[in-house]
Amino acid sequence: MEASPTLIEGRLHDLGDGFTVRRMLPVLQARHVGPLVFFDHMGPATFAPGSGMDVRPHPHIGLATVSWLFEGAIRHRDSIGSVADIRPGEVNWMTAGRGIVHSERTPPDERRDGQSLHGVQIWVALPQADAEVAPEFHHHDRAVLPTIRQPGMEAVLIAGSAYGQQSPVKVFGPMFLLEVKLAAGAELALPPEHLERGVFLVEGAVRWGELDLAAAQMAVQAGPTAPLLRANADSKLLLFGGAPLDGERHLWWNFVAATQERIEQAKADWQAQRMGTVVGDEDEFIPLP
């Protein structure tokens, strides 16, 4: 019997200056969906001229981060020397592996002029065999990401594989991440090759099986088959998921690991400032909580 989707409302956090982040994963109902262990919905927020987002240098281990924006721009810098601005339709994919430090700030032009910012940040747990790989960073322009079209549907394949296409973004296991636009009345079958899947509605209204979703809501479902998605209005959504994780993960602050011992080692390394500094952003850092 086909499993019904589970609704996730998320938890809203106000970071000040009208900038809110809604934590969708992990939650009690879903610690992970495929390899996705963390999903934050940022904004929408409007920054006045002279203000912006400033996420000071902080570390990660055992995961890859992906940022996807609907509006605005963010500048990424890291401890392996990467510098890249991300804008809507582009991908910043950072593989932390055994350890990386990065910062995320509003670029100078957008800070001067003010901007609207809206997007998601996602953590993908690395398979245990790849958890200690060397850190990497890759930026991908919109032109290299596959576009998928079906009646009433147009999608961008951000990462992984779906609908017979493969994103050029380097991933470490079976997964998919898509931005989808559905016209009112259109129906869509989710990629059948992935056993765990989720839907995050950015705008519009959709029905997934017997569940109605409104903007900023998520639903997750697992099993060999999934209900059809139907758009009750013109809608924009993210579809995501993949193969089940190869074991549970510990999440503490910005660290993801298969053992608590590895988390403790990362804490000690950061506290002793053994994880490096962000090139071009060396003056600040976020202390260990």
Image (tube, grey):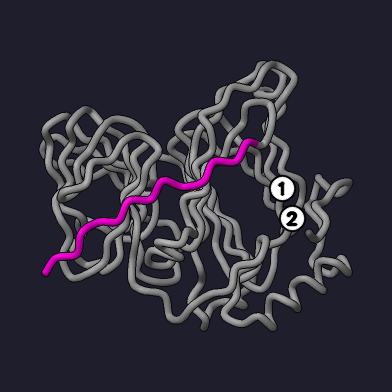
Is residue 216 rendered to the left or right of residue 182?
right
Front residue of this view, candidates 276 and 230: 230
| Residue 248 makes an appearance in the image | yes
Q: Position of residue 154 (x, y in %)?
A: 23, 38
Amino acid type indicated by mark 2:
His
**Residue positioned 34% across, 40% down in the render:** 201
Q: Say if the magenta span includes residue 282.
A: no
Magenta residues span 1-14
On the image, numbered disc 2 is attached to which residue? 58
Q: In terms of image quadrants, where is residue 64?
A: bottom right
Front residue of this view, candidates 30 and 177: 30
Say whether disc 1 or disc 2 marks the residue closer to the N-terminus. 2
Could you tell me if the residues under marks 1 and 2 are in contact, i.e. CB atoms within 8 Å?
Answer: yes
Quarter of the image with the C terminus in it: bottom right
Amino acid type indicated by mark 1:
Ser
Per the rendering, the mark at residue 103 is 1
Q: Position of residue 127 (x, y in %)?
A: 48, 77
Q: Secondary structure at mark 1?
A: strand
**Residue positioned 41% across, 75% down in the render:** 245
Is residue 276 rendered to the left or right of residue 2?
right
Q: In terms of image quadrants, where is residue 132?
A: bottom right
